[in-house]
Amino acid sequence: MTVRKEGTAVTVLVVDDEAAVRALLASLLGARGYQVLQADSAAEGLEIMAASQPELVLMDYCLPDRDGLSVLQEIKARYPASYVIMVTGMGSEELAVELMKAGASEYLLKPFDTRLLVERIDAVRKLREIELANQALQAEREHLLCEIETWNRELQVRVQERNEALHRAQSEIAQTEKLAALGYLAAGMAHEIRNPLNSISLFTQLLREGVEETETAEYLGKILKEVDRIDGIIHKLVDAANRSRLVVNDVRLDQIVRDSLEIFAPQIEARQIAVTISCQEPIVPIKADRTELEQIFTNLLMNAIEEMPRQGRLAVEISSTDGLLQVRVADNGKGIIPEHIEAIFKPFFSTKSRGTGIGLPVARRIARLYHGDVTVETTSPAGTTFLVCIPCEQQTRG
Ligand SMILES: Nc1ncnc2c1ncn2[C@@H]1O[C@H](COP(=O)(O)OP(=O)(O)O)[C@@H](O)[C@H]1O
Ligand SMILES: [Mg+2]
């Protein structure tokens, strides 16, 4: 039988103060193919341990410099892969139990039966190999379990992310469908309503021409105004729902904001609203359809103005950072209650008795076409700030 493993001999360190014993063991074990190291004291033994870390240690319990038990404990603590066989001249069962408890792999009594001695050493060597292989397998198993656990967690996160993305996509599709339905409805409605509306307008005008009484004339004037308002609403609905052809140019967002504000000049003046515009130059031009972008700001400005008391304050702030254009539209209206924050971007949601509920969803849809967004940045009973983000770099859209 050979004890060679992968071309290297198994090393045994013999620690015994008796030179004759060491010589006997060295020749016996050498003949079995072990590589034998020798030490005559605990101190020398520990030095060799540190330098060579032999696989096996054959150590006398009675050493001149230290007691064998403490040396055994030290070796097991520092070199757990070295297996120790303890040898003693005066044996007792208690001592054997104590040594085994302290980590000895075997316990032999002097004088030796040489055949038995070699057998026991071979057995310890085999045990060591099996136990170490086992430990390696165990470690590998734990490592694999750990990895599986990590993959599992990653997988769960991914599934969760996908689910959320799917959810978002579905709700966006639903919103887009609502907007598409709105377009269809608006076009049909415009056609159906405009004819009778036109007749009402004409007959009212005719009536007004023949009326002398001022009160009646005033009422008829009001009817005509309301008819105009209905026509205006239809117009807006059709506009908002059906985007006309894209006209892409270099446009500057600050200019668009100023133009949009211009549209509301009469209301701003009538309600004595204080408007401030701050613009952090330079604002780079972007490739966009001016009408589309104007739509975003007219919708936001209209909401802000509708929301504000007389002599309200409207603040518009334009800035550009890291390739992103940002416009903040802030009012000092009553704010949006937390339960409505999600809903306000859904088509047809409105808290106004005459609201259409399409201003914000349309504004957001357009901003997203430009890979940007419209969000509520802050809101409280002291006012609301909407934030429009549009990336400066724009791909041409089909
Ligand atoms: N600046 C604002 N301050 C407070 N509430 C707002 C503001 N802008 C929008 N909202 C809320 O969002 C709702 C949806 O707005 P919008 O889509 O423009 O439809 P509409 O103006 O026709 O109601 C409004 O009814 C209102 O409740
Ligand atoms: Mg609105």
Image (spheres, grey):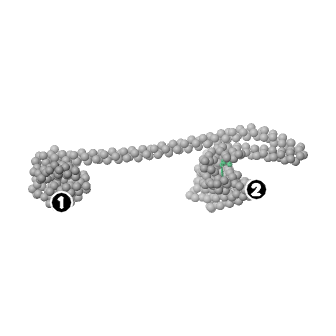
Q: Eyeballing the image, is 349 above or below 314?
A: above
Does the image show residue 253? Answer: no
> Percent x, y for residue 252?
65, 56
Instruction: Please rate how many residues cluster around mark 1, counting C-alpha atoms within 10 Å: few if below 14, some from 14 to 19, many from 20.
Output: few
Q: Eyeballing the image, is 315 above or below 6?
A: below
> Percent x, y for residue 9?
19, 50
Which amino acid type is shown beneath numbered disc 2?
Answer: Ala
Name the residue tied to disc 2. Answer: 270
- Report the side of 265 relative to 89 (left or right): right
Q: Are marks 1 and 2 in contact (CB under 8 Å)?
A: no
Tell which residue pokes out farthest to the front in this image: 94
Q: Quadrant of residue 50?
A: bottom left
Name the residue tied to disc 1. Answer: 66
> Percent x, y for residue 393?
58, 54
Q: Of callouts 1 and 2, which one flags the residue occurring earlier in the amino acid sequence? A: 1
Q: Residue at x 62, y 50 (%)?
A: 337
Does the image show residue 90? Answer: yes
Which amino acid type is shown beneath numbered disc 1?
Answer: Arg
Quadrant including the N terminus: top left
Tell which residue pokes out farthest to the right in this image: 212
